Amino acid sequence: MFYTNRKSTHFVLPIAFSTFATFLSPGSSAASLDDCLHAASQIKAGDFVKVEFLNPSAEGRPTYEIEVRAANGREWEFMCDAENGMIYEMEQEVESADDPLFKKNAKVTAKQASDTVLELYPGKIEEIEFEIETNGDASYEIDVVDEGGTEFKVEVDAASGKVIEVHVEQWEIGEEADERQ
């Protein structure tokens, strides 16, 4: 299937996404993933980089986390309600804690944020992302895998060091360049 808006065309592997979503996300439909991909493409033109299915959020929503790379190379992350296909959160990813958008509000280092996460969720850190919320706040998204293989996505406020969001990743399609081994 193709999604087209004024700025770009996106290609999504329809069989892989639809079949995988139906098989691995009980209670949601393949249409909800399709709706989420379409909703993200309407907000930000670019290429889909990765889709993850996350356990219900604190608000009780099963969530698709969709990453889009815009033509300028910037990556955007969309949190989409897997039941109704509505985007409820959008964040811009930046390369590092040294990015001016991130640095201006960060008071906690990546090491301090990682230590906080590992204290709550012992395991191996797989990835740290540097994100800018829509209100301009900076946060770390830290992915940690425990010894049982469960992957936790923990968001830490870069100003206060407090954990503000936790999800368990159920599955992932795609990967970012910095994740390739």
Image (spheres, helix red, strand yellow):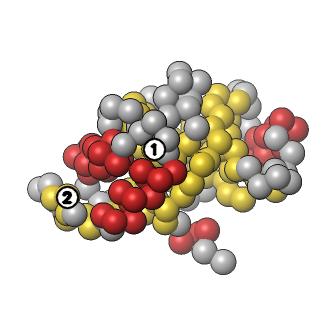
Q: Is residue 86 left or right of residue 3?
A: right
- Quarter holding the N terminus is bottom left
Residue 36 lies, in percent from the top left, at 33, 44
Snapshot quadrant of residue 43: top left
- The tag on residue 121 is none
Residue 18 lies, in percent from the top left, at 36, 57
Residue 103 lies, in percent from the top left, at 60, 44
Label 1 SS? strand
Q: Earlier in the sequence, mark 2 or mark 1?
A: 2
In this view of the protein, which residue sits in the foreground, 79 or 35? Answer: 35
Snapshot quadrant of residue 70: bottom left
- The tag on residue 64 is 1
Visible residue check, residue 15: yes
* Residue drawn at point x = 53 percent, y = 21 percent: 59
Q: Looking at numbered disc 2 in the image, what kind of residue is underneath it? A: Tyr
Visible residue check, residue 157: no
* Residue drawn at point x = 70 percent, y = 30 percent: 163
- Quarter holding the C terminus is bottom right
Residue 153 lies, in percent from the top left, at 65, 44
Badge 2 crowding class, 10 Å Cα cut-off, few under 14, some 14 to 19, many 20 or more, is some
Residue farthest to the top, as pictured: 59
* Residue drawn at point x = 72 percent, y = 59 percent: 126
Q: Is 36 rendered above or below residue 59? A: below
Q: Is residue 166 left or right of residue 10?
A: right
Residue beneath disc 2: 3
Residue farthest to the bottom, as pictured: 181
